[in-house]
Image (cartoon, grey):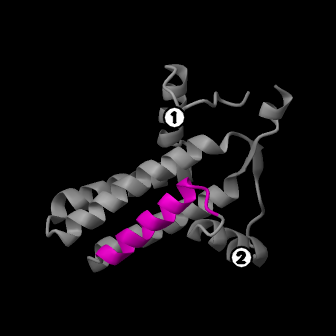
Amino acid sequence: MAAETLRQVDQTALKTGQAATIILLVLAFVLDAWPLVALVAIAQLLGAADAPFAPYRLLYQRVVKPSGLVKPRVIPDNPEPHRFALLVGGLFNAAAAVLLLAGIPVPAWVLVWVVIALANLNFWLNFCLGCWMYYQLNRLGVPGFSRAPVK
């Protein structure tokens, strides 16, 4: 049980990914650029897979953190709910990129704006809807959602 309480997440790293997501997706909308939507989807899906070469992770570790402009804010938390949130965002953006390529822009941009809204909610108000969903699925006993909230 003690190992459970030692699990930690760097909130500043998460906020770096949220900021990058917001900036890139707004830019994609303004420029009507599906490749930017696809790039965000790839970054989110690699983050969800906890890949060591995930773009947002590298941005934080190699640019943002060394710059000294922000400091790590490590808190007790489970990484799995945050990876689940990245997975959901990545799937939304992947679907949006496919829809944009298929010439179906309205539902594509709706998906993109849902991700922008949720990333803003998390960035500004520290509420992660994907994390909340993960913990609800854990509470219901859904297989694969094995981590309960850290107390």
Q: In the picture shown, does residue 63 fall above or below 135?
A: below
Residue 80 at x, y percent in the picture: 61, 42
The residue at 38%/54% (across/down) is 91
Q: Dot 2: few (<14), some (14–19), or many (≥20) neighbours within 10 Å?
A: few
State the image coordinates of residue 36 (x, y, percent, origin top left): 38, 75
Magenta region: 34-51
Q: Is residue 40 magenta?
A: yes
- Front residue of 50/6: it is 50
Residue farthest toward the right in the current orientation of the protein: 2
Numbered mark located on residue 149 in the image: none
Q: Most prominent secondary structure in the magenta stretch?
A: helix
Q: Position of residue 109 (x, y in %)?
A: 25, 61
Residue 102 placement, left or right of 5: left
Disc 2 to disc 1: CB gap under 8 Å: no
Disc 2 marks which amino acid?
Arg
Q: Based on the displayed image, in which of its 4 quarters is residue 95 positioned?
A: bottom left
Residue to which mark 1 is pinned: 134
Residue shown at the point (83%, 33%) measured from the top left: 3
Queried whether the magenta region covers residue 52, the answer comes back as: no
What is the total number of numbered labels drawn onto the structure image?
2
Name the residue tied to disc 2: 62
* Residue at mark 2 to residue at mark 1: CA–CA distance: 29 Å
